[in-house]
């Protein structure tokens, strides 16, 4: 056969021979020669030297020869750009060939020639082909745009090909639509922020129609594209779901999984009491189960995704435990994944079966798998309390097998079981101790030492056991060393009389002979504790431990949400957000489940949130009169107004007010003109905050505050200081304008702060280097740190400042907006938020109303985000939007707020809650 | 999309590479080789391997690794499905998918890959379209081509690619019109020590061979369609009709294709066709182990159980096995420790058995693991789920086709723990 000579073709002599054949007059000989050339190329030999000869064969009517030459061109054009230009003419000609196959072939090949010089010549033919009458040519041309974009993105944009591509989404041929979507998706990946795939109900409808008729690959592209759409309401969501569900019966598993993604995402928007919701849940299970009977590679990807689905919606597969049982000849990567999902699905109902399986797995050959199976038994014990006893006895059985790695894993998990169920299974300690000598892995040794230390009072020879470990102290890993140190200290506290020597030994080993700082530090701490206050030591070392949680390996909820939006992708296989690892996807937008936040919060115990409205004191008790720029705060209009220097009010109003010049001018009083006596943060402005809907945006991450005159010239021998506080890029700055209104030059400026509530202090010297001549002003920005000495001020946000110059020292006090102290990392995890909210006593809550806000909840939350007030969750109850928000002060104090927006009612209710009563009180 | 494809044989040589975008250096496969080295068995190489700049997605078929290189976020299933399609196409074209066959037909392979993907986007993956574009090599055609100088590349536009029924070409003509359907079911099951079923499910497919003239429109109905839990259809099947009436209605592709695959899950009771009595024991301190297996038919609805093959991976400590089969032959590979017993047909009157001893390494301790027994079998003329085709009708054409339906049950992953 042909390969015989193909594979013998190596040396240049043969290249020479081929050259002669390529230039032969006989068509047949030519073709055979080109075939030989291609064959050599395929196996990785360099035949680029033949470039001109091969290109000469291009002008032919023989389709096969043409194709072969095209193949060659694609491979070598890059290395021979000058030569490749010779081919351009033929391409342009072929693009006008009457045969659509040739036209398509030409446009396809053109795009594969990755040479910059050539691309410009290709624009015209490509434009024609995009509008070709034959859909086969159009669909090929659509892909060509993506190719060209890869080579020269600017050119594609300049030539308007992107718009043509967008038009193709409405093409009558489903294949053209699918390819246009595919091309646009690929281009969009390198343009994360461009709005290339502008999805609206019309385009969605077109896509859904094309979905039914295009090829399986086209269906994947379209489904992946649909998944990026956010339906307007639950009706639209349902109708899309209904039209996507038939894809679950496709033979191509990638289509199935992409359909699952769309359904999982859009399901979030469906009300749970809807019949359709239940139907959909039922429809999702069978296709997922079927994926598990496919080839192992498909199974692996499916399992990784099922792992996510099970975490998000365990109800889908809760009856399907058996399909995850491991077959002994499954590849290891499938086995491990199945095991993971088995544990996630384990419940009281099926635990007996699961345990029996796990015990079976623990006798298999594969060490990694056996280890994981043993761990799984421990996790079952922790997850399903009723099964704990059975799990422990299973583990004991396994320990009896004396298989080294099984014993070690078992001991590690038994330690966790002890922590979860203290004082319940200690009877097994004796059995564990028998296996002490066989432990050689650090984790198992550390676990065993922990057990011995923790239950030292019940183990008669605990001191001997620990002493035996101590012999090789320096050869142990850090984990074991730390554990041993703690265990011996525990032992000493429990049995002080017999173990004094031991504890001294370990303390000296840890502090004097070790060069590990962690170990040394811990050693010193124990040493000092023991020597100064044994009672305190007891309290510290033997303190009650927090219970370990059931699911230690759950994916963090926001990440899970994002991953659910990426089902079927690499991200879902690696369980990492796409931005974390895929090259070229810089700035990938984080996807969130639609309406999921509402769902998330409403799942929380209802007792927590709804009830708090009445109980909350009022926090942001702004007086609700028109903005304060018109004058000092009006008298309290509600009883809760006293001391209006509230945290949020003060911060927010000024902050918003001033970034809204329109508002400011609207009230005729530019902020800068505020009276110097204006030393109380203006209240009544939070409503402005919400009133901004007009058109103004808060500049990203910047917080503005009115410029105030802090130090009038008459009080400071001619030096006038006015200024404001700003937060720029996470740094608090005090921006001052120093004006010399005296007759003499001022020099040698310095600044100092008195101790204050939040430890504000200058982070550097005041940068006024040039002398300030009379009637001159100078601007100085002073970065502030929050690590200075702390003293509570009254009001809380009061700051006393001393400024020195060559004339005298001047003192003034000013108040900074609390909002300035809201840190950028003030976004709480939803779970944490809920827990914190629950933890804070009701007495710490306060409530107030903001009137006349015409912003809807989303706009308000965007606004607030600009001021580092983060919306954690949103839900809708009886026509009211509730926004749950968190902010964090620079000193680490969290403030949580609930904002209720009632549609049609311009008045907002804000309830704030904070752990530190002090702050709350000041808020009140 | 898919950047490049490398084919790697069992000994780790890259024997074919194809790039759809810029050329990716072969050295990217080093990451694959590393993973391959770490894996104890060839099939344990993880299907998705990250490298600093690329991702490698691989499938192992016919002892060849098909390694696809991707650079950006691409659904891995999409890549794996495509690779399967490549394997199927090679098999379709060359009869077998082996290194030798691929090397022999390297130009056709290259042409095929070029047609299947364009810049990483799937282009033509339907076998009938590909065959119009590139004719499969046959001995006759090779001869004819050499004499006449014609080519195996089709001249006309692959019409099917654009029609509403892209899976069927127009102008099909046969003198004998026939449509055959094979209902094939595989039982996947795990049986525990005591013989009770832990899990059992049925994977079924209906493979068709349809050679009908023109544009026939077929409907196929079942006696008991509710049995099917989850179905995946060939794109030709009209889904709406199935949803509403549980009838398969379709214009078939020409030739061989898989009409339907289905799943009957553990929710339904799955009949287990055979039972196995086993006694595999090792005694502490003895260098001998006992091995005793007996097979018998269980729920077979009176049909014969044929082509039975029993295999088991014996513990590593086993040096050799000295066994005596009542029928068939057995082999034991002392290197891989794989015991396989070709039983043949089970005679219910005289149950097949395999008895004897295993010799262990002297002084070695008793093996910890219990071998699992794998069973393969075939039962003709029966679908174990009980699925039955009710009728097959043809519309749209006038002639009377010859119709045939065959049933068969096989064991898939049928494992018995001991």
Image (tube, grey):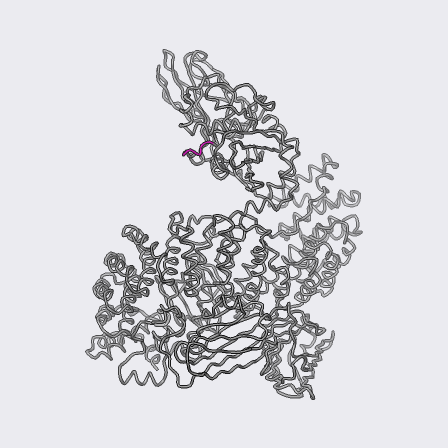
The residue lying toward the viewer, choosing from A781 and A602, is A602
Q: Position of residue B319 (x, y in %)?
A: 64, 79
Residue B20 placement, left or right of A555 = left
Residue A210 placement, left or right of B368 = left
The image quadrant of residue A55 is bottom left
Q: Which region shows up in magenta?
A: A691-695
Asked if one can make out residue B24 in the rendered structure from this viewpoint, the answer is: no
The residue lying toward the viewer, choosing from A540 and B392, is B392
The residue lying toward the viewer, choosing from B285 and B123, is B123
Q: Is residue A903 above or below residue B313?
A: above
| A694 in magenta | yes
Q: Position of residue A93 (x, y in %)?
A: 21, 65
The image quadrant of residue A377 is bottom right
The residue lying toward the viewer, choosing from A351 and A233, is A233
Residue A634 placement, left or right of B148 = right
Residue A770 placement, left or right of A554 = left
């Amino acid at each position: 056969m042909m390969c015989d000579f193909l594979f013998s073709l190596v040396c240049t002599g043969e290249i020479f021979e081929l050259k002669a054949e390529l230039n032969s007059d006989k068509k047949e000989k030519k073709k055979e020669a080109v075939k030989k050339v291609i064959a050599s190329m395929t196996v990785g030999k360099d035949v680029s030297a033949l470039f001109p000869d091969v290109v000469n064969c291009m002008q032919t009517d023989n389709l096969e020869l043409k194709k072969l030459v095209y193949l060659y061109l694609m491979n070598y054009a890059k290395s021979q750009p000058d030569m490749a230009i010779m081919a351009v003419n033929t391409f342009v000609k072929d693009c006008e060939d009457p045969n659509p196959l040739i036209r398509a072939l030409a446009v396809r090949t053109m795009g594969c020639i990755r040479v910059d010089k050539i691309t410009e010549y290709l624009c015209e033919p490509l434009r024609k082909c995009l509008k070709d009458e034959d859909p086969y040519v159009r669909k090929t041309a659509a892909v060509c745009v993506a190719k060209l974009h890869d080579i020269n993105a600017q050119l594609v944009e300049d030539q308007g090909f992107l718009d043509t591509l967008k038009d193709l989404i409405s093409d009558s041929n489903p294949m053209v639509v699918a390819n246009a979507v595919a091309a646009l998706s690929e281009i969009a990946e390198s343009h994360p922020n461009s709005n290339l795939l502008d999805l609206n109900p019309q385009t969605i409808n077109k896509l859904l129609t094309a979905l039914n008729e295009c090829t399986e690959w086209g269906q994947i592209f379209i489904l992946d594209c649909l998944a990026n759409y956010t339906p307007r309401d639950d009706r639209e969501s349902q109708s899309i779901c209904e039209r996507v569900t038939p894809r679950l019966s496709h033979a191509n598993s990638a289509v199935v999984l992409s359909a699952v993604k769309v359904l999982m995402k859009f399901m979030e928007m469906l009300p749970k009491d809807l019949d359709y919701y239940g139907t959909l849940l039922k429809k999702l299970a069978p296709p997922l189960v079927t994926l598990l009977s496919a080839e192992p590679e498909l199974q692996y990807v499916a399992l990784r995704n099922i792992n996510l689905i099970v975490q998000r919606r365990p109800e889908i597969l809760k009856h399907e435990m058996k399909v995850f049982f491991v077959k002994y000849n499954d590849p290891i990567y499938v086995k491990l994944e199945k095991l993971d999902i088995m544990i996630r699905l384990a419940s009281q109902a099926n635990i007996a079966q699961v345990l029996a399986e796990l015990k079976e797995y623990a006798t298999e050959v594969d060490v990694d798998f056996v280890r994981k199976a043993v761990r799984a038994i421990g996790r079952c014990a922790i997850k399903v309390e009723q099964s704990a006893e059975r799990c422990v006895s299973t583990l004991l059985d396994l320990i009896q097998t004396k298989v080294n790695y099984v014993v070690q894993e078992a001991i590690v998990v038994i330690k966790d079981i002890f922590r979860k169920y203290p004082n319940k299974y200690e009877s097994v300690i004796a059995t564990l101790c028998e296996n002490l000598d066989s432990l050689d892995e650090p984790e198992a040794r550390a676990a065993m030492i922990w057990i011995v230390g923790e239950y030292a009072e019940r183990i008669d020879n605990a001191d001997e056991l620990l002493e035996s470990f101590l012999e090789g102290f320096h050869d142990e890993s850090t984990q074991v060393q730390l554990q041993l140190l703690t265990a011996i200290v525990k032992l000493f506290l429990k049995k002080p009389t017999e173990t004094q020597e031991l504890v001294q030994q370990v303390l000296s080993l840890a502090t004097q002979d070790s060069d590990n700082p962690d170990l040394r530090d811990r050693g010193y701490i124990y040493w000092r504790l023991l020597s100064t206050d044994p009672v305190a030591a007891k309290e510290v070392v033997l303190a009650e431990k927090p219970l370990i949680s059931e699911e230690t390996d759950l994916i963090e909820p926001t990440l899970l949400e994002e991953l659910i939006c990426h089902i079927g992708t690499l991200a879902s296989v690696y369980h990492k957000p796409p931005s974390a690892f895929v090259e070229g996807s810089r700035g990938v937008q984080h996807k969130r489940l639609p309406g999921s936040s509402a769902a998330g919060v409403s799942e929380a115990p209802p007792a927590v949130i709804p009830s708090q409205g009445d109980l909350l004191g009022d926090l942001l008790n702004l007086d609700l009169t028109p903005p304060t720029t018109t004058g000092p705060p009006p008298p309290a209009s509600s009883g809760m107004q006293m001391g209006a220097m509230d945290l949020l009010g003060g911060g927010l109003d000024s902050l918003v007010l001033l970034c809204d010049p329109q508002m400011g001018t609207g009230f005729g009083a530019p902020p800068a003109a505020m009276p110097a006596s204006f030393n109380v943060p203006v209240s009544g402005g939070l409503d402005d905050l919400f009133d901004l809907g007009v058109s103004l945006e808060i500049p990203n991450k910047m917080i503005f505050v009115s410029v105030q005159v802090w130090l009038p010239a008459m009080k400071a021998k001619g030096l006038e200081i006015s200024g404001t506080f700003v937060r720029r890029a996470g740094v608090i700055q005090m921006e001052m304008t120093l004006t010399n209104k005296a007759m003499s030059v001022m020099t040698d400026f310095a600044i100092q702060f008195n101790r204050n509530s939040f430890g504000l202090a200058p982070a550097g010297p005041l940068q006024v280097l040039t002398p300030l001549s009379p009637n001159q002003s100078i601007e100085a920005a002073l970065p502030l740190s929050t690590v200075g000495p702390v003293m509570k001020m009254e009001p809380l946000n009061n700051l006393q400042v001393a400024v020195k110059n060559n004339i005298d020292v001047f003192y003034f006090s000013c108040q900074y907006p609390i909002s300035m102290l809201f840190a950028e990392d003030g976004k709480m995890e939803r779970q944490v938020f809920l827990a914190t909210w629950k933890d804070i006593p009701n007495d710490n809550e306060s409530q107030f109303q903001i009137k006349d806000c015409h912003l809807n909840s989303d706009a308000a939350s965007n606004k607030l985000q600009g001021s580092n007030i983060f919306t954690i969750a949103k839900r809708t109850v009886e026509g009211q939007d509730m926004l749950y928000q968190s902010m964090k002060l620079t000193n680490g104090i969290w403030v949580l707020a609930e904002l209720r927006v009632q549609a049609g009612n311009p008045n907002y209710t804000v309830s704030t809650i904070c752990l530190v009563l002090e702050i709350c009180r000041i808020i009140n | 999309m898919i950047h490049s494809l490398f084919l790697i044989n069992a000994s780790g040589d890259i024997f074919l590479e194809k790039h759809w975008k810029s050329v990716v250096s072969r050295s990217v496969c080093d990451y694959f080789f590393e993973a391959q080295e770490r894996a104890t068995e060839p099939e344990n190489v993880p299907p998705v391997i990250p490298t600093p700049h690329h991702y490698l997605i691989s499938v192992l078929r016919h002892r060849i690794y098909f390694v696809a290189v991707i650079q950006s976020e691409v659904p891995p299933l999409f890549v794996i499905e495509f690779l399967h399609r490549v394997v199927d196409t090679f098999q379709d074209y060359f009869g077998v998918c082996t290194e030798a066959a691929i090397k022999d037909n390297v130009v056709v392979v290259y042409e095929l890959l070029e047609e299947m993907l364009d810049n990483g986007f799937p282009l033509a993956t339907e076998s009938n379209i590909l065959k119009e574009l590139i004719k499969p090599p046959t001995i006759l055609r090779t001869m004819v081509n050499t004499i006449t100088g014609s080519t195996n590349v089709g001249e006309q536009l692959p019409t099917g690619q654009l029609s509403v029924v892209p899976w069927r070409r127009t102008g099909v003509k046969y003198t004998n019109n026939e449509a055959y359907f094979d209902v094939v079911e595989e039982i996947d099951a795990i049986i525990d020590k005591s013989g009770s079923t832990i899990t059992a499910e049925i994977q079924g497919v209906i493979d068709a061979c349809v050679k009908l003239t023109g544009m026939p429109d077929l409907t196929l109905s079942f006696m008991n369609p509710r049995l099917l839990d989850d179905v995946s259809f060939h794109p030709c099947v009209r889904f709406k009709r199935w949803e509403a009436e549980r009838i398969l209605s379709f214009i078939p592709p020409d030739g061989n294709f898989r009409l339907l695959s289905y799943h009957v899950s553990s929710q339904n009771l799955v009949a287990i066709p055979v039972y196995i009595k086993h006694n595999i024991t090792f005694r502490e301190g003895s260098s001998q182990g006992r091995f005793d297996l007996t097979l018998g038919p269980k729920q077979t609805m009176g049909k014969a159980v044929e082509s039975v093959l029993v295999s088991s991976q014996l513990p590593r400590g086993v040096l050799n096995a000295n066994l005596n089969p009542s029928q068939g032959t057995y082999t034991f590979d002392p290197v891989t420790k794989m015991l396989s017993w070709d039983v043949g047909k089970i005679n219910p009157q005289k149950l097949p058995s395999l008895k004897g001893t295993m010799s262990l390494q002297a002084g070695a301790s008793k093996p910890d693991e219990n071998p699992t027994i794998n069973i393969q079998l075939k039962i003709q003329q029966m679908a174990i789920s009980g699925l039955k085709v009710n009728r097959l009708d043809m519309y749209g054409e006038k002639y009377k086709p010859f119709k045939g339906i065959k049933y068969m049950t096989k064991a898939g992953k049928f494992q018995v723990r001991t």
